[in-house]
Amino acid sequence: MRSGASIGVAVLFGCMLGPGLGASAARVHLVIAADTLDPKIGKNVAMDRYDVESAFQTNLPPETKILSVTVLEEGQCHPEAIRRAVDGLRVGPDDAVVVTYHGHGAYDAQLGHYLSFPRLGNSYLRRADLIGRIKARGARLGVVVTDCCNKLSMLPKNVPATAGTPRMPAPPPQPSPLFRALFLDVAGFVDLTSSKPDEESISYPATRDQNGIEIYGGGLFTTALVGVFTRSSEQVLTWNQVADQASKAVATAFRKLKPDGLDNPDAPEKPQMTQTVVASLGVRPIRRIDPSPDPQPGPQFDPFDVIVSSQTLGVLGFENGGRGALHLGDAGRQPRRAAGAWSGGTSSCRSTTTRSGRPAAINSRCSVRRGWRS
């Protein structure tokens, strides 16, 4: 069972109407599936669900009428509901379908990677089935993003409107340059997941403020991905660059949270020393994309630096040499580009101690059922 928040996100994106996009009214259909009722990771998952929706609403303002959002949470987050939500979307040939899953996950030698729902017994959804269902909708672009464990188990803050000059109306909201490049100007399929086979995906521990109120952090992967969306909204990046920056941010955060590695019950002598984002990228441009110049390095931001005196860290360190890696699939291996400083997005990214004074646990997103097969 994953000890912390597991998040699986499957995202499919379509193009949208805007300057230079042609006459068709393209849409982006976002489906967020978040297992917020899970007793172990539900509160972490709720933070990720909010951050993802906020990032999309900010980059695709409601006034553009490009984005539609379907949220499956609480009792509505289960395999059949996810299937129905994808099948029920009214998808045009120039649209994008976005499915994000936040919850538990695991890997089976026969089934492959799957999304699991421990609170529902042996309920699960194969990743391959979800991808196939999304592709069957015939959208221009499909993106699957999952932030959940991949261990072997048998079986934001809105951007203010730009003020116009006196007696001049404010310009109509437009998709951000980043989301236009990622979701409107390319076609194909993007498949992202938060950890490679036999790894757990973890979340930031909860904090308590000076009034004793708990503040929950999201998953390392979703926090990093939303951070890229937030930090680079006015830039034009490729999916390779987004995946690379998120991968490096996850590896850095993992080293700080688990300097001595994450316990591995199957091989105690070989702790998990990193969390490796895996990306399979098969996209092609369908409209001209003018890339932004390489961003100049800004001041380094570390989410651990913002902890106030009323909060304490239960786990922190810099001793281990864990390294993350970016695995590229259909698009082939691309040169790694220097990543900008990680902003941490809008999530609360801190660890703390519990009321008993013991370090708060790092939530993982695994659902391990030894010996179970479907």
Image (tube, rainbow, N blue to C red):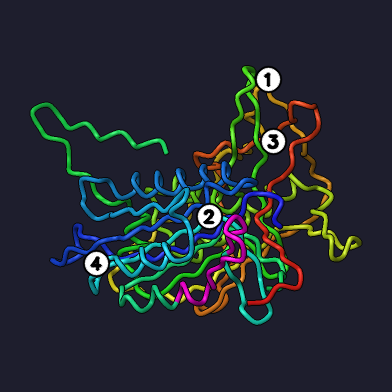
Identify which amino acid the numbered label 2 is placed on.
His
| Residue 128 as seen in the image, left or right of residue 203 | left
From the viewer's side, name the closer residue of 48 and 373: 373
**Residue on which the image places disc 3:** 351
From the viewer's side, name the closer residue of 109 and 328: 109
The mark nearer the N terminus, 2 or 4, is 4
**Residue on which the image places disc 4:** 90
* Residue 102: numbered disc: 2
Query: Residue 113 in the image: x percent, y percent?
Result: 60, 72
Q: Kindly report the distance in space between the C-alpha atoms of the residues bearing marks 3 and 4.
A: 42 Å
User: Closer to the camera: disc 4 or disc 1?
Assistant: 4
Residue farthest left in this picture: 167
The mark nearer the N terminus, 2 or 1, is 2
Q: Kindly report the distance in space between the C-alpha atoms of the residues bearing marks 2 and 1.
A: 30 Å
Identify which amino acid the numbered label 4 is placed on.
Arg
Q: Kindly report the distance in space between the C-alpha atoms of the residues bearing marks 2 and 4.
A: 23 Å
Q: Kindly report the distance in space between the C-alpha atoms of the residues bearing marks 1 and 3.
A: 12 Å
Q: Residue at x 56, y 67 (%)?
A: 124
User: Closer to the camera: disc 3 or disc 4?
Assistant: 4
Identify which amino acid the numbered label 1 is placed on.
Ser
From the viewer's side, name the closer residue of 50 and 115: 115
Residue 223's place in the image compared with 244, above or below, is above
Query: Residue 288 in the image: x percent, y percent?
Result: 29, 69
Q: Quadrant where the C terminus lies?
A: bottom right
Identify which amino acid the numbered label 3 is placed on.
Ser
